[in-house]
Image (cartoon, helix red, strand yellow):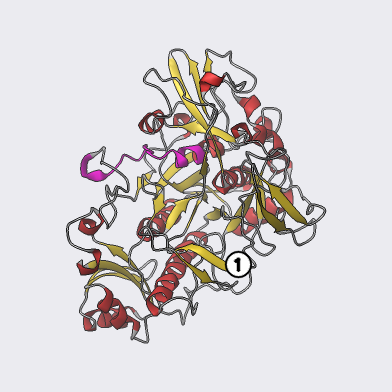
Amino acid sequence: MRRGIRSLTGAGAVLALAATLTAGALDGGATTVASQAREYLVFYADGARDRAIDAIDASGGTALSTETRLGYVVASGPGAHFVEDLAGSDAVVGVSSDRRIGSATAIPGTGAPTALGQSATPDIRETGVGAPEPLAERQWDMKMIGATADGSHAGAPGNKNVLVGVIDTGIDGRHPDIAPNFSYPLSRNFVTDRPKDPNGKTLDGPCEFKDCKDPVDWDDDGHGTHVASTIASPVNGRGVAGVAPGVTLVNLRAGQDSGLFFLKPSIEALTYAADAGIDVVNMSFYVDPWLFNCKANPADSKAEQLEQRGIITGMQRALDYARQRGVTLISAIGNSATDLGRPKTDKTSPDYPKEAERTRRIDNSCLNVPAESKGVISVSSVGPSKRKAYYSDYGVEQTDLSAPGGDEFDGSARYDITKGILAAAPEYALRAKGRIGVDGTPKDTSIIRECRDNVCAYYQYLVGTSMAAPHATGVAAILISRFGKPDKSGLTMAPGEVQRLLYATATSEACPSPREYAYKLDPVEEGVHKCEGSKARNGFYGHGIVNAAKAASVTP
């Protein structure tokens, strides 16, 4: 990871805050957000809980509950003045209103309308049971990393006792190509749907279930289902197979239907993963409203600085808690096409609520969370030719591994969605978005329908570092399956050892020549990205492209 990242959880750590708006405000009530009472997560230093509560009381707030595992107090307070008063305490370093703190890192695919007769037909009926799977030929990504029937699947498909947590928008646990590997009993939903944002604009849309709480096997967005399918769709003669088709998938839902992530569900998901014995988690999201979280950027107000410190502290504590309890942490690096070692300008923050963005100068002290958080393995994205994808972030200190994530323009300036990653999609989500017709026929070539025995299942092409990270997560699951030791939850393996073997089995890739690579997209040039470092470790590929076949045969 990059220099200057420090854990804020040990002795001497300072108080940080992260806030959440009351449910009424988020549902778009008539009162303005500024006049609403709010709830805050008040992170306290070691042994400083009582002082934190005193500061809350003195500032006109009320302490509601305490979370001792991560060291924070849930408090209610009267808005901006409450935050400023808390900032005056020598125990306080961060205060944030509960804005959106995350977005799924996928780029939705769009294909040619089916009427144009594209060769990538979106409708496959009664395909014969193939060796290996009916849609395997479309999975260039699995071929690249050796996760195929004659590769890692043959000798190391993964062990069902290995638990893979997907912190995302949910998992369609009823999908025919996910259900066999899905754990309903262990899965949790930490999110309550929010129909509207604080300004009354649509956020998640109407609630489909009682109390706006979706079941644990539901995914209205489709992002989490795609990620889960890439990790562990089973070998069952249907659709696709994942990297580790024998492991168990656990839904740790922290993302809204809209694809946004808030702080409290995110840290709750990590805490639960640690306590439930999850072996590895996939985090294909990034932290907002700040694309880069800066502790002391002079371009930000004091309140904004405190908000960003709160996000950094809260997430780091949750990540530390999980890793110390045996959870390997894997994250998408991000889709901003940015050298994270040399960020200069942030033009998109804060991006919630809408139209709050402004241009601010930033530097390398500003963090992309969780990709740059301590103890996290960050994954960049490559296309079919193995070039770094045009959208993928990079950095010699930030990129740990690379993996197939798709690149629609790889090898040509013409858009081709089949250069994306194909994985499972919830039928109900596709219907809600108008991606399939009333009769179930896909409307464009980014959607595939595969039918067998009068049961149809859907798949979609997506691109993004969101799609790259689960390939690394699947390889980690293979390693844990092979070398993990029995424990009460199944198998366990030290995250440091998983990381060592992930790096050791990756296929090294040198920087392109010349190192300054120009991406040309139709109809304009996207930009120039410079690769730094050696073949053994560089800013585009990290330690290399993950390799499932090597993971299946390596000796420790």
The residue under label 1 is 343
Give the SS element for disc 1. loop
Q: Is residue 221 magenta?
A: yes
Residue at position x 59%, y 42% from top? 474
Instruction: Give the quadrant of the N terminus.
Output: bottom right
Tell me where residue 95 appears, x and y as whole percent: 36, 73
Residue extending furthest toward the front: 523
Q: Is residue 502 visible?
A: yes
- Residue 217 percent coordinates (x, y): 37, 37
- What residue do we see at 47% from left, 73% from top? 9
* Residue 172 drawn at (x, y percent): 41, 35
Give the camera-side residue of 356 and 93: 356
- Which picture quadrant has residue 431? top left
| Quarter-of-image position of residue 528 | bottom right
Determine whether 434 is above or below 441 in the image. below
Task: Specify whether residue 193 is painted magenta.
Answer: no
Badge 1: how crowded within 10 Å, few (<14), some, or many (20+)? some
Can the viewer see residue 489? no
In the image: residue 183, left or right of residue 64: right
- Give the vertical position of 463 relative to 199 (above or below): above
Above or below: residue 97 compared with residue 404 = below
Amino acid type shown at disc 1: Pro
Percent position (x, y) of residue 43? 37, 73
> Which residue range is magenta in the image?
210-227
Q: How many marks?
A: 1
Question: Closer to the camera, 556 or 216?
Answer: 216
Q: Is residue 39 above or below residue 105?
A: below
Q: Is 138 left or right of 92, judged from the image as shown?
A: right
Q: Residue furthest left?
A: 30
